[in-house]
Each structure stands twice: as C-alpha cells, then as structure tokens.
Image (cartoon, helix red, strand yellow):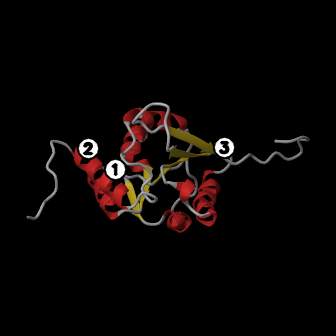
Amino acid sequence: MAHGPIRVGDHMATDATIFFGLWLQKPLRIAAANPSGPRLADALARCADLERPGPVLELGAGTGSLTRGLMRAGCPPNRIVALEGEPRLVTVLRRDFPRMTVIEGDATRIGEYLAGRVERLAAVISSLPIKWFPLEAQRAIVKPCLDLLGPGGRFLQITNAFSSPLPNLLPAQIWSYSQRSETKGRGGPT
C-alpha cells in the first residue's frame, strides 16, 4: 500500500514530520530532532542587532522557525538570506517565505554564494550542527561570515546538547562570535 504525505490541519505539523524524518536519516547533518520553538527563536532574534545595515544570513534555515523569530522581531523577510542544504526543507522555505532569498547549497561554499551579492551582513544566525564538522569546514563557513559582518557583527550559533537536567528535553545554547575592532595608537590589549 502506497502512503502519501501526512495530511494535517497546518503546515507546522507536516514540516515537523519532514524535519524529524530527515534527522532520523541524517543525524549529523540535521542539528536537532525537531525545529526550534518560538521562545528560542525569539531569544535568538533579540541577540541579532537588526539596526546594523545589510541582510541577516540564516545558515541551516530548516523549516523557518528561526526565520519566524526574526520576523517577529521586526526583520522583514526580504532582508533575510536563508541557506539550506536539504531540498525538502528548501521547498518548505520557498513555500512559506516567498519574499525571502533562499539558497539551496552547501554552507562551506557560503563565501562563493555571497561574493559580489552582499557587501555587509547585519547578523548571521546558524543552526548548523557545526560542532560535528571538520575544522576546515568550520573555517570555510565562519571566516567569510565574519569578514562580511565586520567588527562588532555577530555570528550567532545555536547548539543542542545531548543531556538535560530536565527529562525528555534537550537544552539549547546560543553562542555569539564577533571580530574585535582594530584599535590603532591605543596602548594595551583590546
């Protein structure tokens, strides 16, 4: 007997099913078993400085749960550039966010994708399982992003841990990375 897509009242349940299925198939490529919740998405969006000029880059956009947090924080979808490597998730993003730029591709090539298209990024939000990537791949992702962010720009990384003090819940962590600004003629460390 052939099975079609699961019919549910809204996209969120269907999208979560797609997300979970991909996680089961590729646990080291899909960062979590389910999309991030609204509270985490809103907290992450508050960490992004949306007053800075330029687009907001979302790496590993999944089903758009973090995108929705950015939009609730006042970031219009046409200012968001989302990169996603899984074709089924790209389809979800393009369906739900038709005004957002969605790039289907490998995050290690982000420098190539943005070259000549973006002069400066306002923020980068990554939900990639970057801690599992080889060091060379991490550098290929982070360096071009930091270069486009410039001094003071934030590369925000959300990471799921494997254990939790609360049963059946995985904690999430947000890490923020930025370059130090160059200080010439000022003695002492920066």
Left or right for 2, reference 17: left
| Label 2 vs 1, first from the N-terminus | 2
Looking at the rendered image, the quarter that the N terminus falls into is bottom left
* Label ID, residue 63: 1
Cα separation, mark 3 vs mark 2, equals: 35 Å
Cα separation, mark 2 vs mark 1, equals: 8 Å
Disc 2: which residue: 12
Disc 3: which residue: 152
Label pair 3/2, CB-CB below 8 angstroms = no
Label pair 2/1, CB-CB below 8 angstroms = yes
At a point 66% along the width and 43% down the height, the residue shown is: 152
Looking at the rendered image, the quarter that the C terminus falls into is top right
Q: Can you see residue 74?
A: no
Q: Is mark 2 on a helix, strand or loop?
A: helix
Q: Is mark 1 on a helix, strand or loop?
A: loop
Image x and y of residue 22, in percent:
34, 58
Image x and y of residue 62, in percent:
38, 52
At a point 54% along the width and 65% down the height, the residue shown is: 108
Disc 1 residue type (three-letter): Thr
**Above or below 185: residue 111:** below
Disc 2 residue type (three-letter): Met
Disc 3 residue type (three-letter): Gly
Image x and y of residue 163, in percent:
50, 40
At a point 50% along the width and 33% down the height, the residue shown is: 46
* Label ID, residue 91: none
